[in-house]
Image (cartoon, rainbow, N blue to C red):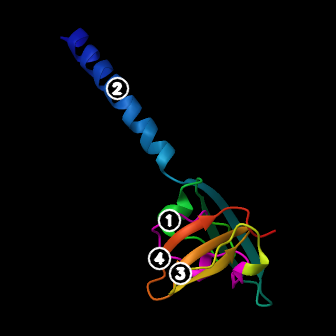
């Protein structure tokens, strides 16, 4: 009876091991810091304050899932909506000043994001093309 129970527990552990490991990798790592402040007043009483700060650290895909901070680099793709808040060195550029850029079709404009030139539809904000390294 005991042998059967141990074998069943071992089988359950082996079966759930990879699932638990992948869940642990997907979860953000936490950095925990506790601070205890003790202050003494004039009347002889002590005040003890305990603060706990928890910071979560995320992997590379976190920016794609949750949104990026302003001025942080982003790889733009055709078909995505161009959000100016996440474009690094965002500004409208003139295609004549850069090699490799053709005249944009009517209703489109080139914008700079880092060293990339992004062709964006004015009305919808959808990206039609990304020219990597066009702006230096």
* Vertical order, 107 against 50 (above or below): below
Residue annotated with mark 2: 13
Viewer-nearest of discs 3 and 1: 3
Mark 3 element type: loop
Which stretch appears magenta?
A: 75-95
Residue 65's tag is: none
Q: On screen, 41 above or below 27? A: below
| Helix, strand or loop for the magenta stretch, by majority | loop
Residue closest to the eye, 128 or 70: 128
Residue count near mark 1 (Cα–Cα under 10 Å), binned few <14, some 14–19, many ≥20: some
- Percent of width and height locating residue 60: 59, 54
Answer few, some or many: residues within 10 Å of disc 2's Cα (few below 14, many 20 plus, some between 14 and 19): few
Please state which of the two labelled residues, at mark 1 or mark 2, is closer to the viewer. 1
Q: Is residue 69 left or right of residue 14?
A: right
Q: Is residue 24 above or below residue 73?
A: above
Q: Tell whether position 7 is magenta.
A: no
- The structure residue drawn at horizontal position 55% and vertical position 68%, both measured from the top left corner, is 129
What residue does disc 3 label?
105
Which of the two discs, 2 and 4, labels the residue nearer the N terminus?
2
Q: Which residue is mark 4?
A: 126
Q: Kindly indicate whether the residue at mark 2 contacts the one at mark 1 (C-beta within 8 angstroms).
A: no
Vertical relation: 130 (above or below) 88? above
Query: In the rendered image, which quarter is residue 73 located in?
Result: bottom right
Kindly state the secondary structure of the residue where label 2 is placed.
helix
Mark 1: which secondary structure?
loop
CA gap between label 4 and label 1 equals 8 Å
First in residue order: circle 1 vs circle 2: 2
Which residue in the protein does label 1 denote?
78
Q: Label 1 to label 2, Cα distance in Å?
A: 45 Å
């Amino acid at each position: 009876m005991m042998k059967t129970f141990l074998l069943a527990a071992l089988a359950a552990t082996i079966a759930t091991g990879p699932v638990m490991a992948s869940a642990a990798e997907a979860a953000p790592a936490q950095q925990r810091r506790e601070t205890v402040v003790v202050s003494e007043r004039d009347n002889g009483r002590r005040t003890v304050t305990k603060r706990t700060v928890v910071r979560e650290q995320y992997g590379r895909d976190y920016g794609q899932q949750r949104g990026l901070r302003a001025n942080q680099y982003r790889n733009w793709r055709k078909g995505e909506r161009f959000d100016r808040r996440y474009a690094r060195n965002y500004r409208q550029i003139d295609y004549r000043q850069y090699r490799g850029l053709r005249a944009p079709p009517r209703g489109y404009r080139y914008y700079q994001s880092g060293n990339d030139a992004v062709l964006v539809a004015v009305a919808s904000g959808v990206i039609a093309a990304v020219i990597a390294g066009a702006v230096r």
